[in-house]
Image: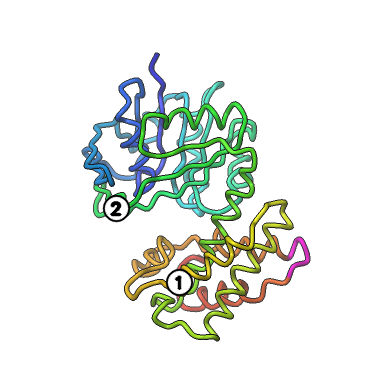
């Protein structure tokens, strides 16, 4: 029996996920894109994979599917509504493959919460052109334990993306955010942290990470101190030329950035719990003041 899967947002992450899933002949893959593309070609750690999924650019062309995977930026949530209105039927489940820790909150006004599956993904990939992607390391996915999460993880059983249903998904998501929270620094300075490392910069980086961990723990996540220390060590050893990932890349390209999902959320939830987050608040403010368009 064929499983129908639609991916909204076939960028670097969505395109890579779609290409891997398309290797299974039992899956019917549809890409929901703003602009047409001919096919998918992904250079992966185990070789090049290709796929020729159906590509739709108009939500009116879409039909209900078994699974929808949303891989847009967090600030593009509302743009997915026309697609979700057409793709989501009575049995459809929706996986949210996005940064941050607020997957369900962002989409529960569009899809019943019991059919939403938040996804924590670690999949280093970069798009060079529509449908052309380089995946630099093997991917890891974590989803909440339970039927929906286990069914989603099973879709990746024959791929090179390791997917696990985790009873403590909350901690997985917050540990990733704790590690990624540092990216605000190179995104602001436009320079890798390692070559500029000194005691003053370390104090800033440590403040960012410690604040994130404190807020995550208040939210109920288990964040070991080793995760904090590893994040700081990685920042200390970041080589010249390295970037802050997608946040840095979006700033260089003049694109809107996911700063609210990455650091703004730390400030907002810190305020909710009465936890001071001065480092995150300061850098979010400075990044906005730098002329970045994320506030628009």
The local crowd at label 2, few if under 14, some if 14 to 19, many if 20 or more residues have their Cα within 10 Å, is some
Identify the residue at image location x=30%, y=29%: 23
Q: CA distance from mark 1 to mark 2?
A: 22 Å
Q: What percent of the width, then of the height, locates residue 206? A: 59, 74
- In the image, the segment drawn in magenta is 271-275
Instruction: Estimate the x, y position of residue 248 in percent, counting from the top left.
Output: 40, 67
| Residue, far right | 274
Number of numbered discs visible in the structure rendering: 2
Most extreme residue toward the top is 1
Residue picked out by circle 2: 127
Q: Is residue 63 above or below residue 215?
A: above
| Furthest residue in direction front, as rendered | 226
Q: Secondary structure of the magenta portion, mostly?
A: helix
Q: How is the image coloured?
A: rainbow
SS at badge 1: loop
Side (left or right) of 82 relative to 214: left
Q: Which residue is mark 1?
A: 292
> Where is residue 44 drawn, in percent x and y?
27, 45
| Tag 1–tag 2 contact (CB < 8 Å) | no
Q: Is residue 64 left or right of residue 105?
A: left
Q: Is 274 a magenta residue?
A: yes
Image depth: mark 1 or mark 2 in front: 2
222 is within the stretch colored magenta: no
Q: Is residue 170 above or below residue 19?
A: below
- Locate residue 177 relative to residue 79 in the image: left or right: right
């Amino acid at each position: 029996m064929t499983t129908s899967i639609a991916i909204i947002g076939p960028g670097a992450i969505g395109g890579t996920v779609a290409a891997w899933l398309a290797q299974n002949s039992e899956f019917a893959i549809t890409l929901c894109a703003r602009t047409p593309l001919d096919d998918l070609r992904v250079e992966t750690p185990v070789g090049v994979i290709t796929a020729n999924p159906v590509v739709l650019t108009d939500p009116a062309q879409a039909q209900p599917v078994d699974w929808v995977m949303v891989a847009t930026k967090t600030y593009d949530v509302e743009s997915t509504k026309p697609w979700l209105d057409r793709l989501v039927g009575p049995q459809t489940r929706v996986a949210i493959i996005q940064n941050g820790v607020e997957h369900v909150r962002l989409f529960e006004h569009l899809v019943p919460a019991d059919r939403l599956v938040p996804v924590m993904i670690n999949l280093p990939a970069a798009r060079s052109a529509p449908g052309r992607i380089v995946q630099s390391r093997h991917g890891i996915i974590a989803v909440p334990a339970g039927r929906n999460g286990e069914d989603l993880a099973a879709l990746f059983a024959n791929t090179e993306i390791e997917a696990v249903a985790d009873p403590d998904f909350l901690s997985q998501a917050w540990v990733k955010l704790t590690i990624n929270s540092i990216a605000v620094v190179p995104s602001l300075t436009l320079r890798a942290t390692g070559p500029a490392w000194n005691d003053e910069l370390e104090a800033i980086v440590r403040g960012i990470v410690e604040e994130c961990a404190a807020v995550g723990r208040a939210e109920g996540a288990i964040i070991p101190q080793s995760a904090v220390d590893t994040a700081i060590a990685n920042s200390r050893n970041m080589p010249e030329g390295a970037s802050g990932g997608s946040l840095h890349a979006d700033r260089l390209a003049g694109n809107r950035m996911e700063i609210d999902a990455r650091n703004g959320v730390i400030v907002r939830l810190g305020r909710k719990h009465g936890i001071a987050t001065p480092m995150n608040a300061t850098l979010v403010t400075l990044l906005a003041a730098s002329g970045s368009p994320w506030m628009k």
